[in-house]
Image: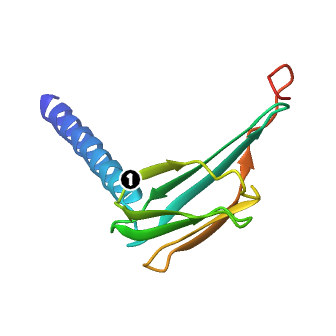
Amino acid sequence: MSVFYNVKKGATAGIASGIIIAIAVIVFFATKPAEKYSLSLDPFIDQQSLVTNTHVTVQNTGIEPLTNVRVNYGGGSKPDIIPVLNPGEKQFLSPPANSDLQEVTVTTDQGVNVTKPYRSAPKMVGMMGS
């Protein structure tokens, strides 16, 4: 009886170890950036009755640095230029006053080109600005 119990216990431990290793491999490859050059762009606008709050978040999601990251806000405003954005680095920017607040375009020396419209938070009843 004890031999069968030890074999069953060993098989269970082996299966559990295999599952843990499989999960670790999946997590490792799922979190590792696949692209050499890529970025995340998040233009945000919060329009309230008295004031409009805006910000733009740019993050290097690739595995190589991005150079001359040009953030164009539209409307004839002067773009922001980030000389170097290292992998994983994130910059928070404020659009200039004369921006049209419709969309933001980001380009880099490496050929990355991303354009996104501003997103806004949903308005909730009873909250300021709703």
Residue in view at x 76 percent, y 58 percent: 100
Between 117 and 99, which is closer to the camera in this rendering?
99
Between 77 and 128, which is closer to the camera in this rendering?
77
In the figure, 88 relative to 1: above or below? below
Residue 30: give x, y in percent of width and height.
Answer: 41, 57
Left or right: 31 as drawn, with respect to 78: left
- Label 1: how many Cα within 10 Å (few below 14, some 14–19, many 20+): some
Residue in view at x 24 percent, y 44 percent: 17
Give the residue at the far top of this rendering.
126
Amino acid at the residue labelled 1: Glu
Disc 1 secondary structure class: loop
Q: How many marks?
A: 1
Q: Identify the colour scheme used.
A: rainbow
Residue 99: give x, y in percent of width and height.
Answer: 71, 57
Left or right: 53 as drawn, with respect to 18: right
Residue in view at x 86 percent, y 29 percent: 130
Between 9 and 36, which is closer to the camera in this rendering?
36
Left or right: 120 as drawn, with respect to 109: right
Residue in view at x 80 percent, y 22 percent: 127
Give the residue at the far left of this rendering.
3
In the figure, 66 relative to 55: above or below? below
Residue 14: give x, y in percent of width and height.
Answer: 22, 45
Q: Report the residue marked by disc 1.
A: 89
Quarter of the figure with the N terminus: top left
Residue 92: give x, y in percent of width and height.
Answer: 51, 47
